[in-house]
Amino acid sequence: MMTIVTHITLREGCEPEWDTAMRERLAAVKGRPGWISGQLLMPTDALKRVIIGTWQSRADWEAWHRDPTFAQTRARLDGLEAAPRQEWWHEVMLDLRASELDGFGGAVDAARDRMAAALSATADWLRPPGRRAR
């Protein structure tokens, strides 16, 4: 199982249109072979977005990127972005879901750990280049 984290910087004023197009894309990916889950995050900097997608394999993700439905939203989204996307691939070592955990406390702990990792990477990305974590 693979997870891709994508960081995007939007052009000012394009946020609503980009968000709508991305919601359409995420709705279209449901049921695709190999797709497991997706999240769209908005950091406190309203011009940034983070997409977290989890797939059975990178090949499944690549097949989705060759789909005409994907290509339609890609052209629309690219024109709304201020800078090239940044992507990081991760092999999933452990995947815990609330339904698989014992009790509410376990779900909260797992969610906190996942979000801490994603937010740490995002916070570093948002820092000016001379002040990034080493």
Image (cartoon, helix red, strand yellow):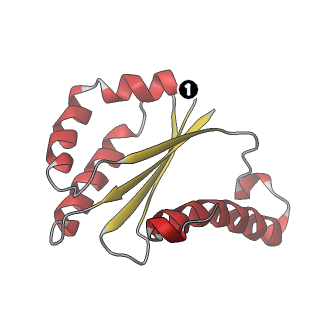
Q: Residues within 10 Å of mark 1 (few under 14, many from 20)?
A: some
Q: Is residue 111 above or below residue 29?
A: below
State the residue in front, 110 or 124.
124
The residue at the point 72 percent across, 63 percent down is 113
Q: Position of residue 32 (x, y in %)?
A: 41, 30
Q: Is residue 6 left or right of residue 70?
A: right
Kindly identify which residue carries mark 1.
57
Secondary structure of the residue carrying numbered label 1:
loop
Q: Quadrant of the N terminus?
A: top right
Q: Position of residue 97 (x, y in %)?
A: 70, 53
Q: Quadrant of the C terminus?
A: bottom right
The residue at the point 30 percent across, 55 percent down is 23
Specify the farthest residue to the front.
130
Q: Amino acid at mark 1?
A: Ser
Q: Is residue 114 above or below residue 78?
A: below
Q: Is residue 128 above or below residue 73?
A: below
Whether residue 33 appears in this view of the structure is no
The residue at the point 81 percent across, 72 percent down is 105
Whether residue 55 appears in this view of the structure is yes
Q: Is residue 40 left or right of residue 118?
A: left
Q: Is residue 133 left or right of residue 22?
A: right
Q: Is residue 115 left or right of residue 5?
A: right
The image quadrant that residue 28 belongs to is: top left
Q: Position of residue 71 (x, y in %)?
A: 21, 33
Specify the farthest residue to the right.
102
Q: Position of residue 77 (x, y in %)?
A: 20, 49
**Numbered circles on residues, count:** 1
Specify the farthest residue to the bottom.
44
